[in-house]
Every structure is written in C-alpha cells, then in structure tokens.
Image: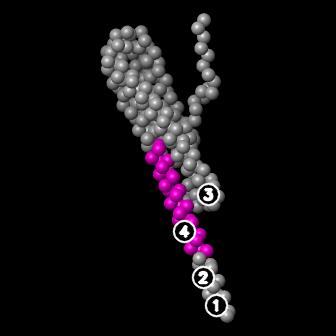
Amino acid sequence: MKMKKGVLAVVIVAALAAIVLIWGVKSYNTLVSKDEHVSQAWAQVENVYQRRADLIPNLVATVKGYAAHESSTLEAVVAARARATQATVDPAGLSSEDIAEFQTAQNELGNAIGRLLVSVERYPDLKANQNFLDLQAQLEGTENRIAVERRNFNQAARDYNTYVRRFPANIVAGMFGFGPKGYFTADEGAETAPVVSFE
C-alpha cells in the first residue's frame, strides 16, 4: 500500500513536470516565432526606406540637368541620403531609442526631398519632364509603402510585446532574454494641425 502511494506520487510529479516542460517549450517557440515576425516586419521597413534611397540619385540627376543653380538643395538631399542609408538598427534589439534615431535620419531625408520638390516649382520644363514625373510618382508610392510597413511593424511589435508581458509567458521570456521591442512614433508636433491662411 505504501509502495503504491509512492509510485502514484512519482507519477503525479512526473506528469506535472511534463506539463510544465511542454508549456515551457510551447511558450519559448511562440516567443521565437513572434520575435522572427517582428524582425521580418523590420526588414520590410528597411526595404521600403532603401527603395526611397535608391530613387534619390535618379531624382537628383534629373533635377540637376534643369536646375543647376539649386546645388545647395541637391547637396542637402545627397547628404541626407548618405546619413539615412548609414542609420541601421539591429533587429535583435529594436529599442525605442534605436528606432527613434533611425526615424530621425529618415525624416531628415524626407524633409530634404520635400525642399527639393518645392524648389522644382520654379522650373516648368522640369515639372513637365516625363522622367521627373515618373520619379515623383514612384517617390509618392514609396512614401505610402513606408507608412504601411511602419504600421505593420508596429502591429507585429505590439503582438510580440503583449505576449512577452503576459503571465505566465513572461517567465519564459525573462529566462531566455526576450525583451520588449520599440515602436515607430509620430513626429513631434504631428498632433497639431497646420494653420492654413489665404490672407
């Protein structure tokens, strides 16, 4: 009788240990899958930003042919592109600070492109040039892609961060070093609508 109770206790302990082990493996594998999804979403963000950077040399060359005296604006675009392509973030970390630094470099490039496109308004021949129109359309499409991929990244990061923080998965996450990921945020001042005045 005593022997049967001892065996039963061992079986119960072994069963509980097996359940905990299965749960731990499942939680770990889910964390790995969600982490990979965030990394894949980040790669898509970098991909569309790279697409924009790849369009810029053609845009600069097209504008240069028509507006040679806009050299300071063109140089600013080229310099901003260089800084933007050098800004990289390790997908394993993706902290809020790293993403903010990356976003700052990309915003600088976007602002430089915006100034270039405004300066083009003074050149009607350039505005009618088919190459320029095609490049402008591609840039607009790329900006839309950037917005979509940033949203997709934020959704993947939210899903991952929620899982990492939930109990009991947070135990496995802590044991294996799975930390929260950062998000893309709105630019400072984006919450304020621009004032339009026709006076």
Q: Earlier in the sequence, mark 3 or mark 4?
A: 4
Is label 3 in a helix, a strand or a loop?
helix
Q: Earlier in the sequence, mark 1 or mark 3?
A: 1
**Residue 114 x, y percent position in the rendering:** 47, 21
Q: Earlier in the sequence, mark 2 or mark 1?
A: 1
Label placed on residue 11:
2
Disc 3 + disc 4, Cβ < 8 Å: no
Q: For the magenta stretch, what is the residue range? A: 16-42
Is label 2 in a helix, a strand or a loop?
helix
Q: Earlier in the sequence, mark 4 or mark 2?
A: 2
Mark 2 is surrounded, within 10 Å at the Cα level, by few (under 14), some (14 to 19) or many (20 or more) other residues, namely: few
Q: Quadrant of residue 7?
A: bottom right
Is label 4 in a helix, a strand or a loop?
helix
Above or below, 39 relative to 121: below
Q: Quadrant of residue 117?
A: top left
Above or below, 67 relative to 92: above
Q: Can you say which quadrant of the picture contains the N terminus?
A: bottom right
Separation (CA) of disc 1 from disc 4: 27 Å
Taking the magenta stretch, the answer to whether it contains residue 150 is: no
Separation (CA) of disc 2 from disc 1: 10 Å
- Dot 4 amino acid type: Ile
Label placed on residue 4:
1
Colour mode?
Answer: one colour
Disc 1 + disc 3, Cβ < 8 Å: no
Disc 3 + disc 2, Cβ < 8 Å: no
- Dot 2 amino acid type: Val
**Residue 124 x, y percent position in the rendering:** 37, 9
Residue at 56% over, 55% down: 178
Dot 3 corresponds to which residue?
170
Dot 4 corresponds to which residue?
22
